[in-house]
Image (cartoon, grey):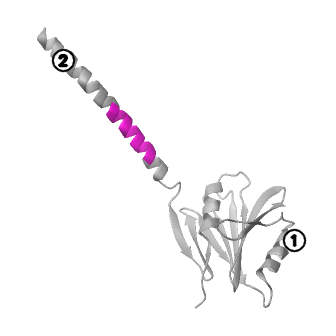
Amino acid sequence: MSRCRSTALSEKAVRPASRRTYVFVWVGLLVLLLLLPAAPLRAEDFRRFSVLVPDGWEVTERPEEMFIFRPPAGDAAAVIICAPLPDRRPAADVLEAFVRYFSGSEPQQRERGGQTFDFVRNGQKNSAFFLHDARSYLLLTVSDPHERYPECLTMLMDSLALRKDD
């Protein structure tokens, strides 16, 4: 009988510890999943700017400093145009010209710098991001018709940096 009691006591003593361990392991896994980035990133440096690109995204360079970024499924696009500011033309005028060209919304200042505006093309809502320094401007237009990549596209926008001329 003493043997049964000791077994019962040891089972009671073991159960709470195994439950705590189980909970600890699950909480640890959840924290790890939250800390891992949604998609690995790779830094891309171009002549006039740098950007972090989600791994697996294709980058196509076109003439006249145009770059197209597409996810593996090809169902969205981010297009970047980066060029010197026209002589004696303030960046605000260049932004205004783009807003007029795209029939865009009123530009909004971003906390992290630059301005954004929305526009419609082929019945689809698109977004644009305008960034400049004293010598260059950068325009990023984003088309994500199924809204599958908002985090990736925001990350592209947040990581953009104009390169300083030597």
Mark yes or no: residue 16 visible.
Answer: yes
Q: Is residue 139 magenta?
A: no
Q: Is residue 66 above or below residue 17?
A: below
Query: Dot 1, how many residues are within 10 Å of its Cα: few (below 14), some (14-19), or many (20+)?
Result: few
Give, as a single range, the part of the protein colored magenta: 20-31
Q: Quadrant of the N terminus?
A: top left
Mark yes or no: residue 64 visible.
Answer: no
Q: Quadrant of the C terminus?
A: bottom right
The structure residue drawn at horizontal position 60% and vertical position 82%, both measured from the top left corner, is 163
Q: Is residue 95 above or below residue 47?
A: above
Residue position marked by numbered label 1 in the rendering: 100
Give x and y (percent) for residue 12: 26, 21
Q: Which mark is residue 7?
A: 2
Q: Nearer the viewer, residue 86 or 9?
A: 9
Magenta region, main secondary structure = helix
Query: Dot 2, how many residues are within 10 Å of its Cα: few (below 14), some (14-19), or many (20+)?
Result: few
Q: Nearer the viewer, residue 147 or 114?
A: 114
The structure residue drawn at horizontal position 84% and vertical position 59%, both measured from the top left corner, is 122
123 horizontally vs 42: left or right: right
Three-letter amino acid code at disc 2?
Answer: Thr
The structure residue drawn at horizontal position 18% and vertical position 17%, both measured from the top left corner, is 7
Q: Which mark is residue 34?
A: none
Three-letter amino acid code at disc 1?
Answer: Arg
Q: Is residue 30 magenta?
A: yes
